[in-house]
Image: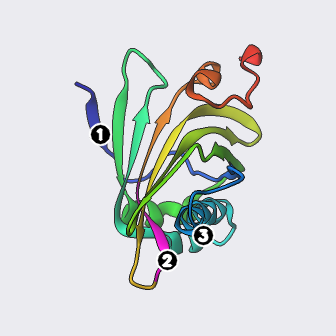
């Protein structure tokens, strides 16, 4: 069984430039995808308080770290702690995600797809994002929990980040 680690802050900040599907099944599917786009834009924002507007503070972030395949682990990051430490973010982070699956059932939604991540312009890892959304009484979708895998750059194509040239890594 994988060892699970609870850590106080997410070691990697996330930002994203989504690669969106052209059509969504319903307006709710579009709204859920748009909420993830807003979440990703907030991560990239210089306004360090904006991210809190897109997340449920009681949520959790699960980092399925497979950078060392011989020693995979899962780190658990409480969103409230992550948001408190967000102000310490430095560097230039960028993430590209493909929204391969957008599912909605009532006030619950899931956006799933591969991503690539760079820090100061260098590809650091790729993986798959799984973002769970909750629609509040005001009708707005917020990120309730998020999970993502992390693999080394030479495995980007393997996890679906096909926009990365897998021959370069």
Q: Which circle marks residue 5 in the picture?
A: 1
**Foreground disc of the pair 2, 1:** 2
Residue that mark 2 sits on: 140
As drawn, 57 above or below 99: below
Q: Which residues are magenta?
A: 139-145
Residue reaching furthest to the front? 25
Task: Give the image location of residue 47, x and y in percent.
Answer: 65, 72
Residue that mark 3 sits on: 48
**Quick one: quadrant of the C terminus?**
top right
Is residue 142 rendered to the left or right of residue 62?
Answer: right
Q: Which of the two residues, 27 or 160, is positioned nearer the viewer here?
A: 27
Q: Indicate which disc, 2 or 1, sits on the residue closer to the N terminus.
A: 1
Q: Total marks drawn? A: 3
**Quick one: quadrant of the N terminus?**
top left
The image quarter in which residue 160 lies: top right
Q: CA distance from mark 1 to mark 3?
A: 26 Å
Q: Indicate which disc, 2 or 3, sits on the residue closer to the N terminus.
A: 3
Q: CA distance from mark 2 to mark 1?
A: 31 Å
- Secondary structure mostly seen in magenta is strand
Asked if the magenta segment contains residue 140, the reply would be yes
**Foreground disc of the pair 2, 3:** 2
- The residue sitting at 62% across, 26% down in the picture is 156
- The residue sitting at 63% across, 61% down in the picture is 37
Q: CA distance from mark 2 to mark 3?
A: 20 Å
């Amino acid at each position: 069984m994988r060892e699970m680690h609870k850590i106080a802050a997410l070691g990697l900040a996330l930002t994203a430039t989504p690669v969106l599907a052209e059509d969504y099944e319903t307006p709710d599917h579009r709204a859920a995808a748009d909420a993830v786009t807003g979440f990703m834009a907030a991560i990239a924002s210089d306004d360090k308080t904006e991210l809190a507007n897109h997340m449920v503070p009681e949520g959790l972030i699960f980092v399925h770290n497979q950078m060392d395949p011989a020693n995979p682990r899962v780190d658990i990051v409480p969103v409230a702690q992550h948001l408190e430490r967000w102000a310490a973010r430095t560097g230039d982070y960028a993430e590209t995600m493909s929204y391969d699956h957008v599912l909605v059932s009532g006030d619950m939604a899931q956006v799933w797809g591969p991503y690539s991540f760079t820090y100061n312009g260098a590809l650091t890892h790729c993986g798959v994002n799984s973002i769970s959304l909750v629609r509040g009484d005001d009708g707005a979708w917020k990120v309730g929990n998020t999970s993502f895998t992390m693999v080394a750059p030479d495995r980007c194509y393997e996890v679906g980040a096909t926009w990365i040239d897998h021959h370069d890594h």
